[in-house]
Image (tube, rainbow, N blue to C red):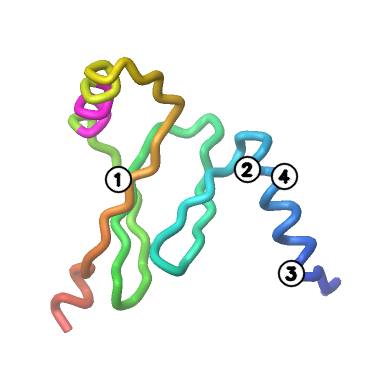
Amino acid sequence: GKHVSRATVYRTLAKLVEAGLLRKIEIGSRTVYDHDYGYPQHEHLVCDLCSKMIEFQHPGIDAALRAVAAEYGFRADGHSLVVRGTCAECNAA
């Protein structure tokens, strides 16, 4: 296959973030790019041991964040929630 330089990949990712199609999330020393466009708001569980990322949705989190934003008169355009810990498989090991 055709080789694409790492720099080209990062430039492309940056453009997609600017366009609002991807969201850049920093998880400790890792950077993750998440699909944002036309996709329901979702949160992330990230395993510190195997790095698996689990996406989930919970209406209670959205409601709580809306309440907090309202309390501070803050207009939220989106959020990214990352919960770090240990996944079921790693816990069982």
Residue 53 image position (x, y, % from top left): 37, 61
Distance of mark 3 from mark 1, alpha carbons? 30 Å
Question: Which residue corresponds to the image point at 74% horizontal and 52% vertical from the top-left?
Answer: 12
Q: Which amino acid does label 1 sit on?
A: Phe
Q: Mark 3 points at which residue?
A: 6
Expressed as whole percent of the image width and height from the top left, the position of residue 67 reads 21, 21
Magenta range is 61-66
Name the spot of residue 52 as percent of width and height, x first.
36, 67
Specify the quadrant that holds the C terminus.
bottom left
Q: Do the residues labelled 3 and 4 touch (CB within 8 Å)?
A: no
Q: Regarding mark 3 in the picture, which secondary structure is present there?
A: helix
Look at mark 4 in the image and give the residue it sits on.
15
Query: Is there CB contact under 8 Å for labels 3 and 1?
Result: no
User: Residue at the spot x=70%, y=59% of the render?
Assistant: 10
> What is the secondary structure assignment of the residue under circle 1?
strand
Which circle marks residue 17 in the picture?
2
Q: Which of marks 3 and 1 is in front?
A: 3
The majority secondary structure of the magenta stretch comes to helix
Q: Quadrant of the N terminus?
A: bottom right
**Circle 4 residues within 10 Å: few <14, some 14–19, many ≥20:** few
State whether residue 4 is above or below residue 32: below
Q: Is mark 4 on a helix, strand or loop?
A: helix
For this orientation, the residue located farthest to the right is 2
60 vs 38, left or right, is: left
**Residue contact at pointers 4 and 2, CB within 8 angstroms:** yes
Q: Which of marks 2 and 3 is nearer the N terminus?
A: 3
Return the residue at label 1: 56
Instruction: Check disc 3 and give the amino acid type.
Output: Arg
- First in residue order: circle 3 vs circle 1: 3
Comparing 80 with 91, the one in front is 80
21 inside magenta stretch:
no
